[in-house]
Amino acid sequence: MGTRPRFLRRFRTREAPPRRRRREPPPDPGLPEVILNWHARDKELTETGMRTIARRLPAVIAQAARLAWRASRTDTLVTVGLNLAAGFFTAFWLLATTGVLTALFSAAPTPSRVRDALPSLALVAGAVALRAALQAGAGWAQARLDPQVERLVELRLYEATTAVDLTALDDSDFLDDLKRAQGRGLMSAPMVVQYAVDVLTAAVGMIAAAGTLGVLHPVLLPLLLLTAVPEGWASVRSARMRYLMLLSLVGVTRRKWILSDLMVERRHAAEVRSFTMRGFLLGQYDRAASYQRHVELDVARRQTIVKITGDLLKGVATALVYVALGVMLWKGAVPLAVAGTAVLAIRTGQSSLANLVFAVNHCYEEGLYFGDYVSFCAAAEQRIPHRALAPSPLEKRGRLPDDFADIVVEDVAFTYPGADEPSLRGVSLHVRKGEVVALVGENGSGKTTLAKIMAGLYDPDTGRVRWDDVPLTSVAPHDVWERVAVIAQEYTHWPMTARQNVTMGHGDDGAVSSGNGDGEDPSMLAAARASGADEVVEGLARGYDTLLDRRFKGGAELSGGQWQRLAVARGFFRDAPLLICDEPTAALDARAEHNLFERIRTHADGRTVLLITHRLASVRYADRIYVLEHGRVIEEGDHAALMARGGLYADLYSLQAAAYGAGAADPQAAGEAQAAG
């Protein structure tokens, strides 16, 4: 017997405790414990049973109705109205059938019986035709509704994820919830609406059949309802098994997705081959896939047993219904015509019951997944900074000046979600307009984190950042970002045209170029020239209209240095008062690096520059240098003062200078050697 996985040990039902000898696949020791430990929804799921579904289904349907109403009121009303009308004609044609059978089973000659049945036959034919037309119209309205629901839920998700506090995207729990919401949760939105409509349609058909049976003979109604119990039980058990399985495998699925990305994406291909990673990645993927296969096969076996049991019980219940009808006919409790109509009503009712059970089952199941989406969106919207939302009419907010005299950081501390140690510990600094201020230090010292806080991307845990006298936490983040340009080490290779890669978020992205710059935005051309990106564009087949993604026809791929020049041009094009350069030369050779820093100095004339770099020769001419270590500012001053102090900055600078063949005792010569590359 295998060991029961931890994520399955805790899933127990009150109504049907697990059998002691149930075989479960053993946990894969190669998978991290965090992947197997998915318990966020286990309390809710352990309560899932027929009574639970009956209690919660109205809330799921109400949620689907609100979603459909928001997507399209007209299509929602048409769908519901036509389905209700179709149900009315279902009852009508069943009752009209009694007249047909009564005429056909009368004692008159056959031609007379047929003639007497013709009016009722016409009514039946008309009712059936109208019912079919109404159902077709309802289907058309529902088909129109689905894409509108998809658009609505997708916009809500992406509106939240693009506005959420940046720390949320550093939170592993948030990312796991996002994966569930973006995957099955997003797909379930139109499906929960569709199944809610199906519940309505089947319920109307069931009510029509049950009403007909109630009119014909009251005893037939409870017998019909009896046939729904076995199938309902089997469907609920099967759906619950599937949902528990999918929930338990979210982590495994996410790991498989990451591994597949490593094996198929071009950006990883060279390193996968050069480090002979193929066997390792395939092994990791196969272990995850094997574990998933074991879980899925076990669930499929148990679902099959449940389905067979449900079908057997349903067959017994159906037999009892027909036996009871036969006894009633034998005893003369119902006439033959009524019995014939009852048979049609029972078959119609059973069909509607099957559809109802199926729709209820899937509506509830999809409602669980949709609940993941709704819960995530609600949680994400709670993590959107309040100041990022539109202010109320009575709310007063600070406003940043178009430019600033100084930026002051006061005793700022910050810790990333889930981190054991803070990244910043009581950091204070002062940046004046027009200055070039450098942040230096070893890896992990907090330089980039501090720059992000100064740019309004993160809010400090304690302390504050002021632009002039306005705290950043009192203004909308967008107002801060509009006044900041960033040239980062980790930048996006946007799968768009060269022009759009420069003017991203600003300018006229729809301009058409002949490749030589004619008719282009002068400020874009100036930014491209200042960064050297114009030389990159000259080598492209369609100039600024070239799509920079080789996965598409006619697309081009750039080298790391070429992409870096476009990223720099993007920062230059954004004419903001604060320019943050975070390791902007990481992908450049020594000569290109020297040229870029010269361009930054020239382009930044009059602008404030915050420079983060490990290449200390580039910071020699900074107005002020802050040296960080373990999240604290340990040194401050210009290059000469820090070299004279002989602290960490002097040590780092001397080490780099020695690598260029200049003695540490001659820092001026060392700096010139570094700059020369």
Image (cartoon, grey):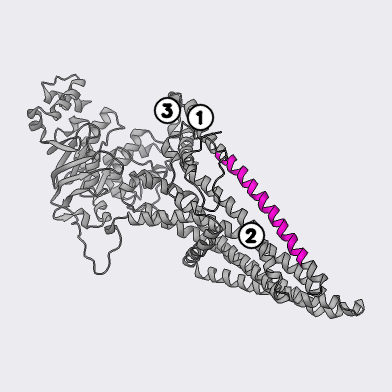
Q: Please check the rendered image and state whether residue 579 is part of the magenta-colored stretch, yes or no.
A: no
Side (left or right) of 413 relative to 167? left
Secondary element at image label 3: helix
Q: Say which label, 2 or 1, has the lower sequence index.
A: 2
- Is residue 555 visible in the rendered structure shown here? no
Task: Look at mark 1 in the image and give the residue it sits on.
Answer: 282
Mark 2 in CB contact with mark 1 (< 8 angstroms): no
Task: Look at mark 2 in the image and give the residue it sits on.
Answer: 229
Q: Please check the rendered image and state whether residue 313 is part of the magenta-colored stretch, yes or no.
A: yes
Q: How many marks?
A: 3
Side (left or right) of 183 relative to 676? right
Gap between marks 1 and 3, in whole Å? 15 Å
Give the extent of the magenta segment: 295-324
The answer to which quarter of the image holds residue 123 is bottom right
Q: Say which label, 2 or 3, has the lower sequence index.
A: 2
Q: Quadrant of the C terminus?
A: top left
Question: From the viewer's perspective, is the residue at label 1 or at label 3 nearer?
Answer: 1
What mark, if any, has residue 271 been given in the picture? 3
Secondary element at image label 2: helix
Q: Which residue occupies 11% across, 22% down?
A: 666
Gap between marks 2 and 1, in whole Å? 47 Å
Q: Say which label, 1 or 3, has the lower sequence index.
A: 3
> Where 335 sits versus 256, above or below?
below
Secondary element at image label 1: helix
Q: Amino acid at mark 2?
A: Val
- Badge 2 crowding class, 10 Å Cα cut-off, few under 14, some 14 to 19, many 20 or more, is some
What mark, if any, has residue 328 been given in the picture? none
Q: Amino acid at mark 3?
A: Glu
Q: Amino acid at mark 1?
A: Leu
Question: From the viewer's perspective, is the residue at label 2 or at label 1 nearer?
Answer: 2
Indicate the position of residue 427 as horizontal and vertical percent values: 16, 42
